[in-house]
Image (cartoon, rainbow, N blue to C red):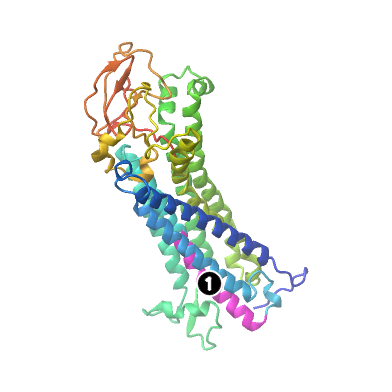
Amino acid sequence: MDIPNPGEGDVNIGTSTFQACWVLTAIVGVALLFRYAVKIWVRWALPEVTAPGRIWGTEDLFFLVAWGFDITHMVFIQMSASWGLGRHFFYLTAEERLYSMKWDFLSQPLAVASAMVSRAGMMWFLLTCFAASDKKIRLSIIICAVVQVVVNMVTIVQIIVQCGPNPYQTTNRVQYFHYMWTPLPEDGSVKCQSPTVQTTVGFVQGGFNTVIDFFLAVLAAVELWQFFLRTLHRNPETSFWSQFRRISATVRSRRIWQTITLSGPLLLSGCASIVKTYKLKSLGDRHDFTYNIVTFVLWVKIENYSILLASCAPVARLFLRSFVDHRREGRTPGYWSRSRSMDRKEPETELKRRANAKEQWLDSATMTNMTITCVHDEENPPTGWNEHGHERSISQVSKAEMPEHVDDGCVTVKTDIVVQVDDGRSISSGGTRLLPDGV
């Protein structure tokens, strides 16, 4: 093939780009280390009666495996860079061309696997957060997980089995993978797919990943603001901003934080997937492959790491609320003991609910209050118990005991999570819809 002579000379754009990728890798590594360190602290440093029973979840394994794939991917990319990845193909020797392409092609399945596993972990996390939601939401998340796993696995297989015997015959095509970077036999006994095939598969994969990321981001935001949106739907004459200003400052800031840390990284991942998909044309252009693919690698890392960073937001908020805030207030009570009860004289009694607390999952539990409190619809406070014929509803998930007393539109219940009590306007078909309390 004719290799064009670039007019800008023998430049290397890979050095600074790959350094940035390593910085991102280190940041995510520190964030994940912090996540696991906090969980170890919860398990070993806090009193057993104040910690949830299930500290570790399946998503922890997903995130660790995904980061492991990312580390290996970066190692292969760095080895490729040592042979000329980032320079123009025209200026590389035959040996440099072979090894730079070899390590790059070996890294591609790892990059796809990392994105697939990290998304699977995020979806598992969303399932734990929205466990009290109706079946449609849970089913939507499961379908997204299955689709993205299938699409990404097909992409990985396509990368590995691009080459095979000619004419076609059933055989182990993995052993022909090395022909992606080594010369094909002159007798034509081996044939590889056209580069446009991999580009097309990449476009399809990128499209699915983008749609799934955006869908999950919207789903998470809608779940977080469900009461606010329902209030607007029930009162169409109420403007968005007037209802938004009615929300208490504490609740409003908490919801905004939750939306930014949960939906934000998913949106960023979707946007990065769009840019990465556009950059896929570099895979089809083999004339200057080592130079054109550099920016593609950068956007692959941004896509993968945005999801992994999002996984650390709940634990970071847990650490700040249960450690820093208590130290600032001059007290060091047990885990999650900041009661929002209206009665300041009422003792904090989450220790009495040890049995139920043991059923909580740490990541999803950080998004739920675990105190005995007087609760109501945060975004639409009731004006009186009997004003609209209010009825009392208790979440099927909470398994709460019967309320002890009713006073001024509020019900005090002994439970380890928030129980929504209102006029029935925020009740779903599956029971009370519980808002996360903090990501």
The residue indicated by pointer 1 is 105
- Residue at (51% x, 85% y) in the render: 188
Question: Over which residues does the magenta segment extend?
Answer: 93-114
From this viewpoint, which residue is outermost toward the bottom? 187
Q: Position of residue 335 (x, y in %)?
A: 37, 40
Circle 1 crowding by C-alpha within 10 Å: few under 14, some 14–19, many from 20: many
Left of 107 or right of it: where is 119?
left
Going by the image, does 434 lie left or right of 19?
left
Disc 1 marks which amino acid? Phe
- Across and down, in percent, residue 146 comes to 36, 54
Q: Which secondary structure lies at badge 1?
A: helix
Q: Quadrant of the C terminus?
A: top left
- Count of marks placed on residues: 1
Q: From the viewer's perspective, tell me whether residue 241 is left or right of residue 235.
A: right
Dominant SS type (magenta):
helix
Task: Quadrant for residue 348, please give it.
Answer: top left
Q: Is residue 59 positioned above or below 373 on the image?
A: below
Residue 423 left/right relative to 27 = left
Which residue shows up at 29% across the image and 13% down it?
389
Quarter holding the N terminus is: bottom right
Q: Position of residue 52 (x, y in %)?
A: 32, 44
Residue 197 visible in the displayed image? no
**Residue that appears at 44% across and 43% down:** 314
Queried whether the magenta region covers residue 60, the answer comes back as no
179 or 376: nearer the viewer: 376
Name the foreground residue: 428 vs 384.
384
Outermost residue to the front: 330
Task: Using the image, determine if residue 194 lies above or below residue 277.
Answer: below
Residue 348 seen from this side: yes
Asked if residue 338 is positioned above or below residue 244 in the image, the reply reads below
- Residue 234: quadrant of the picture: top left
